[in-house]
Image (cartoon, rainbow, N blue to C red):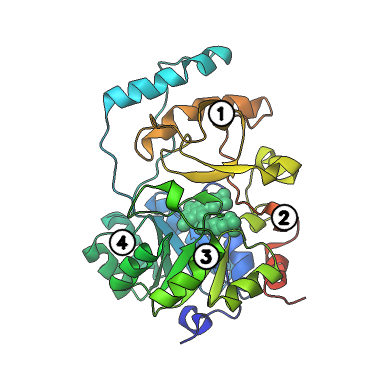
Amino acid sequence: MSLQNLLGIELPILQAPMAGVQDSALAIAVSNAGGLGALPCAMLDANAVCKQVEILRAGTSRPFNLNFFSHTPPVPDEDKAQAWRALFAGYYAEFGLDAGAQPAGPARLPFDDAMADVVCELRPAVVSFHFGLPAPALLKRVRDAGARILASATTVDEARWLEARGVDAVIAQGLEAGGHRGMFLNEDIATQVGTFALVPQVVEAVRVPVIAAGGVADAQGVRAALDLGAAGVQVGTAYLLCPEATTSAIHRAALKRESARVTALTNLFTGRPARGIVNRLMRELGPMNAQAPQFPLAAAAPAPLRARAESLGNGDFSPLWAGQNASGCREIGAGELTRALAGLR
Ligand code: FMN
């Protein structure tokens, strides 16, 4: 079965779910254009997911994807947390912030029974997971609710692992990709693979359709990925300047500068490696730092600094997530961009 038939879409273009920079508006525009719009749910509670889906269904009758994280919840370690806070003390002093009053940072909860209840109630056409898969019983609930299941793989081993657990398609996420790496079988960023090396190897290794992600930003890139055997492409960064995205003014400005070409993987903002535009915090404490607490606990320390710096108009402490190829970012409607990616006018 073709990917389009599997997912009920017209174009082989999937909008990457992007927590923190979009809500249902972006997904509606992409789904209405014939691609697969996605709603990132990792930072939403059950009520917020229901509300966004209500808006989605009012805006489109076409399929969309609900995306969740499936990481193992962290074991808090007070010594590690203290050492991490101490690393940020100089910045807190610089901005006149109280280092003792660090809030927990935004929650990023793994998919659980409460979210499975939501999926069973809402019955989305597609559900995708990042950082592996939830426990088999939870995954079965999603499948029984009628959803097609997608998940990210960053290595051939991860792709095989996902296929063995019954996913309907694998998203092959190359090293170029913006945002968090979906890696889950090992933590070694040195051996992660670029999109155009990963896709053909994953296509060879699994029987389910493969969706290429990472660094694809225009119609030529989409064609090249399809030529390598991908059945579709998941695009994130290129959508960040669309008016339907909620990308902040600071993030938008950073994407438009030449320096958007300089990205790196950093664990400073959450504890897991994610690709963003290099900024002051990444230059001074990272980009990778061995002291970072487990995902998502590392997020607490930079969060107040981010808020203060952004209120002063700078992104020195913000996660400016972006892939290595921001050349496709255009200030046009997400529907128009989706059609352009598919090579249509
Ligand atoms: N992937 C997810 O599965 N869930 C997320 O919540 C998520 N958030 C992201 C936020 C941003 C701002 C970006 C740029 C990417 C995010 N990703 C997330 C990764 C994408 O799924 C995808 O792998 C990536 O965008 C593809 O590479 P590209 O950005 O070069 O197009």
Amino acid at pointer 2: Ser
Asked if residue 33 shows in the view, the reply is no
- Kind of element beneath mark 3: helix
Picture coordinates of residue 100 (x, y %)?
A: 40, 16
Q: Which residue is mark 1?
A: 281
Q: CA distance from mark 2 to mark 1?
A: 24 Å
Amino acid at pointer 4: Ala
Amino acid at pointer 3: Ala
Amino acid at pointer 1: Leu
| Left or right position of 216 against 229 | right
Q: Report the mark closest to the observer, 1 or 4.
A: 1
Q: Which residue is mark 2?
A: 327
Picture coordinates of residue 132 (x, y %)?
A: 34, 58
Number of numbered markers: 4
Image height check: is 7 above or below 191? below
Quadrant in the rendering for residue 295: top left
Could you tell me if the residues under marks 2 and 3 are in contact, i.e. CB atoms within 8 Å? Answer: no
Which of the two discs, 4 and 2, labels the residue nearer the N terminus?
A: 4
Q: Which residue is mark 3?
A: 197
